[in-house]
Amino acid sequence: MLSFFKSSKKKNTQKGKAFYERENLVQTIEELNEILSMLDSDDNINGKDPLLFQGKEFNTINKNILEEYFGEESFILNPDNNISEHEVYYYRITSEHLKFLIQIHFIDNQFFLAGTKVYSDSLLSNNDKQRVIKNITNKYYPEADSNLTEFNIVDPEGNILWTKDDIFYHINYLYNNSTCQQLKKQYFGLGKPQSGQEIKNTLDSLI
């Protein structure tokens, strides 16, 4: 994929902590487990080429080089999600009429997860969405059906790229490293609501 950092200009409009908390891919341990489960998903499509994030190999991404790679961050979030030593670096980028909210996640100072949300001031047009999808599939999944908008790609190292198509378009990356494997051992099975608790929680929040 093209590097949004090199080709785009950061927007200076300030956002508060609540905005970045809402955007966080890992707000709960349950969400963390859902993401980690993608490492073993039967829906993953095998890709031949190593996945890159913004043109960078996953094993080169660390907090010491973030500014060199990506410039000054828009926000650093320390989520209150009961996940130890979790930090998220955010970057807000604009390129012509498109906007990109990028988040880079660390656990114990180790990179393991990143995401890019693609949007605009109005609804993201089909043409813009197709441009983004074509950029991904040309590089990693050239045989993809032209109508496909959501897919999971696993590279030879077991790293995952997956997309989500809703009001916005999301491109997420999971680094299959020792940090991910440790997170699976540490948090597997935690965070799931007990039977009936999910309904009770929903009713409590709505009524």
Image (cartoon, rainbow, N blue to C red):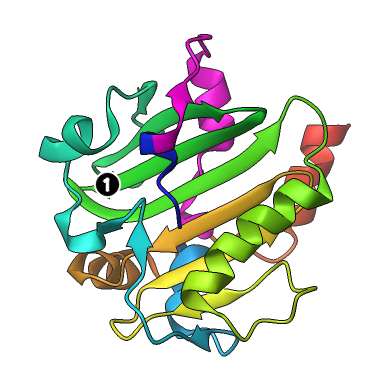
Tell me: 18 left or right of 8: right
**Given the image, on which type of amino acid does mark 1 rest?**
Phe
Q: Is residue 85 shown above or below 45? A: above
Please state which of residues 183 and 40 is positioned toward the viewer in this rendering: 40
Tell me: 11 left or right of 110: right
Quarter of the picture containing the N terminus is bottom left
The residue wearing badge 1 is 106
Q: Is residue 66 shown above or below 158? A: above
In the image, farthest residue toward the top: 13
The x and y percentages for residue 166 are: 77, 51
Residue for point 28% across, 82% down: 157
> Does 77 appear in magenta?
no
Please state which of residues 51 and 75 is positioned toward the viewer in this rendering: 51
The x and y percentages for residue 83 are: 34, 47
Q: Residues within 10 Å of mark 1 (few under 14, many from 20)?
A: some
Residue for point 50% across, 17% down: 11
The x and y percentages for residue 180 are: 29, 67
The x and y percentages for residue 56 are: 26, 55
Quarter of the picture containing the C terminus is top right
Tell me: 164 left or right of 33: right
Residue for point 47% across, 10% down: 12
Please state which of residues 157 and 122 is positioned toward the viewer in this rendering: 122
Q: Which residues are magenta?
A: 7-32
Residue for point 54% across, 79% down: 141
Question: Which quarter of the figure has residue 53?
Answer: bottom left
Residue 55, can we see it? yes
Q: Secondary structure at mark 1?
A: strand
Count of all numbered marks drawn on residues in the image = 1
> Does 22 appear in magenta?
yes
